[in-house]
């Protein structure tokens, strides 16, 4: 298992949802993404909200993090509960 620490000078660059699965209404221009785990179910619910308040449910999400030096990491989340950092 690799470890990645987000430093204080990092910021969220983009919130994407549905882009990995090609879902309808997929975008990298969401204002908010809610990721909910309902125990004991290992599956999660991913809901993204756009700038006018519309909510959409997706099977996947990506949170793109950018450091002050311009380097980026993506946090990939699937509704199966799988989370990876690339």
Image (cartoon, rainbow, N blue to C red):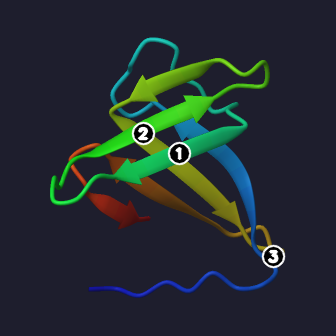
Q: Quadrant of residue 70?
A: bottom right
Residue at x 74% of width, y 53% of height: 13
Q: Label 2: state its secondary structure.
A: strand
Residue at x 33% of width, y 61% of height: 83
Q: Earlier in the sequence, mark 3 or mark 2?
A: 2
Q: Which mark is residue 34?
A: 1
Q: Which mark is residue 5?
A: none
Q: Which mark is residue 69?
A: 3
Q: CA distance from mark 3 to mark 2?
A: 30 Å
Density class for disc 3 (Cα within 10 Å; few <14, some 14-19, many ≥20) is: few
Tell whether 16 sits left or right of 1: right
Q: Label 1: state its secondary structure.
A: strand
Q: Which mark is residue 46?
A: 2
Quarter holding the C terminus is bottom left
Select label 3 or label 1 by which is in front.
Answer: 1
Select label 3 or label 2 by which is in front.
Answer: 2
């Amino acid at each position: 298992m690799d470890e990645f620490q987000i430093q204080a000078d990092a910021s969220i660059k983009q919130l994407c949802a549905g882009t990995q699965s090609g879902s309808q209404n997929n975008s990298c221009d969401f204002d908010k993404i809610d990721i909910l785990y309902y125990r004991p179910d290992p599956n999660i619910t991913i809901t993204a909200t756009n700038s006018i308040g519309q909510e959409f449910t997706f099977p996947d999400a990506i949170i793109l993090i950018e450091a002050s030096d311009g380097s980026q990491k993506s946090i990939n989340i699937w509704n199966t509960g799988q989370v990876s950092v690339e």
